[in-house]
């Protein structure tokens, strides 16, 4: 049974509540559980009142959809009142509250996510999720086509859970419904798509899911031109679990604009896609020159994407401290070099000299070079 700090206080306020969704799934799968969500047959206002009666902070984070976050010791627990769908349009749902646990479970996406667990550990499994989890089957609750039409993001969520829990062939009904409904993915915001793509590629072994995405036509919609063969090559090299590295392997497309990557993600992706300039025969001076221009993580990422054997280079790169050019503009100003284009030229020339020497010259040696360039 999961016992995260603060859970006992939530259950003290809401003894009729049940742990739901991913926490139950991961507990049964024997995986780590970092977050726990609850469901309650009580209305949101009653949940808030119960929590506050015990001195707990209750934040109405999604009150119109019945979600209250109870904060205990800095940890948030989402508590959502039992619901049933009244209307859906493929992206949003209008809900009504209910006290029927099975009705609430029926609106969830997959059987493995539709289980709930009481405080004393009793599991409620209305749709065979426990057996599906044990068999490695990702199966929609009810009719797959209906679940997808309610929210097209469930197509990508299918691949995310298939990547993590799927064993053997995929559920045939799910595959047929995904093929039929894949165009609905174009209705989704790119932020939601990118969030799910990252989660798919964060699975330890995502290749089967990615290949199935290609077979169903989903991959071409969300990552046009993606080549799973390149991802397979990256995985064979033993590359670490790194969604952005795996994206760089899959496709050369500029995703920064298409999927609205964050600035940091876009910058890292550009760095990963630059040509890997190092080779196994390079000396330490060459490695220091490369590190002067790119941080360790970028060069190591480039080495994983390189077709050659980069294992030895990665080991050597990690053993070398990244060199930092020892001069700044103020150092030149102290020698009387006027700020402006001339200063930039001198700095560039001295840095070029420093690079050619293997990035080992210190500040004093570099200042001597400044004097020579400045007087020349």
Image (spheres, grey):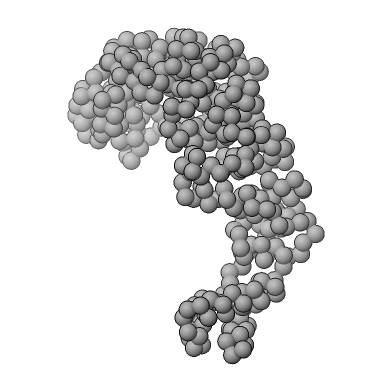
Q: Quadrant of residue 319?
A: bottom right
Q: Position of residue 141 (x, y in %)?
A: 47, 12
Name the residue: 62% across, 28% down.
210
Query: Do we see residue 68 in this rendering?
Result: no
How far from the left and from the top, in percent, is residue 106?
40, 12
Against 301, residue 68 (above or below) is above
Q: Is residue 214 visible?
A: yes
Q: Is residue 304 above or below residue 101?
A: below
Q: Nearer the viewer, residue 211 or 161?
A: 211
Q: Is residue 56 above or below residue 124?
A: below
The relative height of residue 112 versus residue 355 in the rendered view (above or below) is above
201 or 240: nearer the eye? 201
Q: How many marks?
A: 0
Percent x, y of residue 17: 32, 20
Front position in the image: 217 or 366: 217
Q: Quadrant of the C terminus?
A: bottom right
Q: Residue at x 57, y 13 (%)?
A: 176
Residue toward you, 31 or 216? 216
Residue 132 picture quarter: top right
Q: Relative to 342, is 231 on the left or the right? A: right
Of all residues, the one furthest to the bottom in this rendering is 375
Q: Quadrant of the N terminus?
A: top left
- Give coordinates of residue 131: x percent, y percent: 55, 12
Q: Residue at x 57, y 50 (%)?
A: 270
With 73 as the anchor, is 134 left or right in this view? right
Q: Residue at x 62, y 42 (%)?
A: 252
The image quarter in which residue 91 lies? top left
């Amino acid at each position: 049974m999961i016992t995260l700090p603060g859970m006992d206080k939530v259950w003290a306020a809401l003894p009729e509540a049940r742990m739901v969704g991913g926490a139950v799934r991961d507990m049964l799968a024997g995986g780590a559980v970092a977050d726990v969500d609850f469901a309650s047959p009580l209305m949101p206002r009653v949940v808030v009142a119960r929590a506050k009666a015990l001195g707990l902070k209750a934040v109405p984070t999604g009150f119109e959809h019945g979600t209250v976050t109870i904060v205990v010791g800095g940890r948030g627990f989402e508590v959502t009142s039992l619901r049933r769908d009244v209307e859906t349009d493929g992206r949003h749902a209008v809900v009504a509250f209910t006290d029927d646990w099975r009705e609430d479970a029926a609106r969830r996406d997959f059987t493995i996510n539709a289980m709930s667990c009481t405080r004393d550990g009793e599991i409620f499994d209305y749709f065979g999720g426990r057996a599906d989890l044990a068999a490695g089957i990702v199966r929609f609750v009810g009719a797959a086509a209906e679940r997808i039409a309610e929210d097209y993001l469930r197509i990508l969520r299918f691949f995310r859970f298939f990547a993590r829990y799927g064993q053997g062939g995929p559920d045939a009904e799910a595959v047929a419904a995904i093929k039929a409904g894949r165009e609905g993915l174009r209705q989704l915001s790119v932020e939601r798509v990118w969030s799910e793509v990252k989660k798919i590629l964060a699975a330890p072994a995502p290749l089967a899911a990615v290949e199935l995405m290609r077979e169903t036509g989903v991959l071409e919609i969300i990552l046009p031109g993606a080549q799973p063969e390149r991802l397979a090559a990256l995985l064979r090299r033993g590359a670490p679990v790194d969604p952005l590295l795996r994206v760089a392997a899959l496709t050369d497309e500029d995703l920064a604009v298409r999927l609205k990557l964050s600035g940091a993600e876009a910058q890292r992706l550009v760095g990963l896609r630059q040509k890997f300039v190092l080779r196994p025969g390079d000396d330490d001076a060459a490695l220091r020159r490369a590190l002067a221009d790119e941080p360790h993580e970028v060069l190591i990422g480039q080495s994983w994407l390189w077709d050659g054997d980069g294992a030895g280079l990665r080991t050597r790169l990690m053993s070398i401290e990244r060199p930092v050019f020892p001069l700044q503009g103020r150092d030149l100003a102290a020698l009387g070099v006027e700020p402006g284009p001339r200063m930039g030229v001198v700095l560039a020339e001295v840095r070029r000299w420093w690079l050619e020497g293997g990035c080992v010259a210190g500040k004093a040696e570099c200042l001597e070079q400044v004097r020579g360039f400045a007087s020349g």
